[in-house]
Amino acid sequence: MEQFIKQVSSDLKQALTDLQKIIPFSEEAILVIGTSTSEVVGEQIGTSGSELVAEAIFHELIKVQKQTKIQLAFQCCEHLNRALVVERHVARNRRLEVVSAVPIRKAGGAMATYAFANMEDPVLVETIQAEAGIDIGDTLIGMHLRPVAVPFRSSVTQIGHAHLTMAYTRPKLIGGVRAIYHSESE
């Protein structure tokens, strides 16, 4: 299991490095993280949450956060309507509504539970509009990304046994080359 955990950390580190080449991580950006630790260990989502896997993933993300200052948002499972664990200052700065719940392994998932227990001043928010996301195990993070989400393929396709999907967002492109942005009568 020790070698497996090291590989999970190594693969996540590479995936995050790949994503940072496309979108710079900074304190103004939020990275939403959806993780099925069950899928990482090769089981069906929601059936075998692993604190060891959650710990490894959390610590790798915290390393990146300390280097880049990116803000982290850990998505809960559907039992908490995919609410997100964030630091209180993120909720305050983004004017996010805090909700009254505390994730536990069976209602929130192992990853969100671990994050809530190990962040400095965690709160739960119902929704967010993040600039980038990493989905480990098909947890469906799309609802928490800003429009327009752009899929991104890393050199890493799996974390453990879990399918890896990442995305970043960009401003909407509207109008195109034929668009008129002021009245011709002006």
Image (cartoon, grey):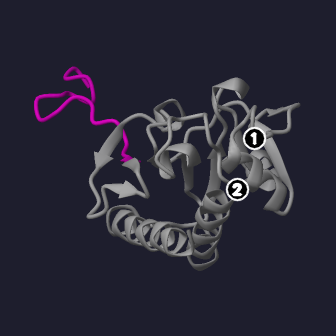
Question: Could you tell me which secondary element the residue under label 1 belongs to?
Answer: loop
The quadrant of the picture occupied by the N terminus is bottom right
Residue at the spot 67% in from the left edge and 63% down from the top edge: 55
* Label disc, if present, on residue 105 of the rendered structure: 1
Percent x, y of residue 17: 39, 71
Left or right for 75, reference 80: left
Crowdedness near tag 2: few (<14), some (14–19) or many (≥20) residues, C-alpha within 10 Å? some
185 and 127: which is toward the camera: 127
Residue at the spot 62% in from the left edge and 37% down from the top edge: 128
Q: Is residue 182 above or below residue 119?
A: above
Percent x, y of residue 109: 69, 40
Disc on the earlier residue, 2 or 1: 2
38 and 96: which is toward the camera: 38
Percent x, y of residue 15: 38, 65
Q: Which residue is mark 2?
A: 51
Q: Is residue 106 above or below residue 78?
A: below
Question: Could you tell me which secondary element the residue under label 2 belongs to?
Answer: helix
Residue at the spot 73% in from the left edge and 49% down from the top edge: 86
* Label disc, if present, on residue 77 of the rendered structure: none
Please give the range of residues in magenta: 168-186
Residue at the spot 66% in from the left edge and 50% down from the top edge: 111
Percent x, y of residue 171: 37, 42
Amino acid, disc 1: Arg
Left or right for 134, reference 33: left
Q: Quadrant of residue 56?
A: bottom right
Residue 132 seen by the camera:
no
Q: Is residue 145 above or below residue 152?
A: above
Asked if marks 2 and 1 touch (Cβ < 8 Å), the reply is: yes
* Residue sticking out furthest to the left: 178
* Residue sticking out furthest to the bottom: 67
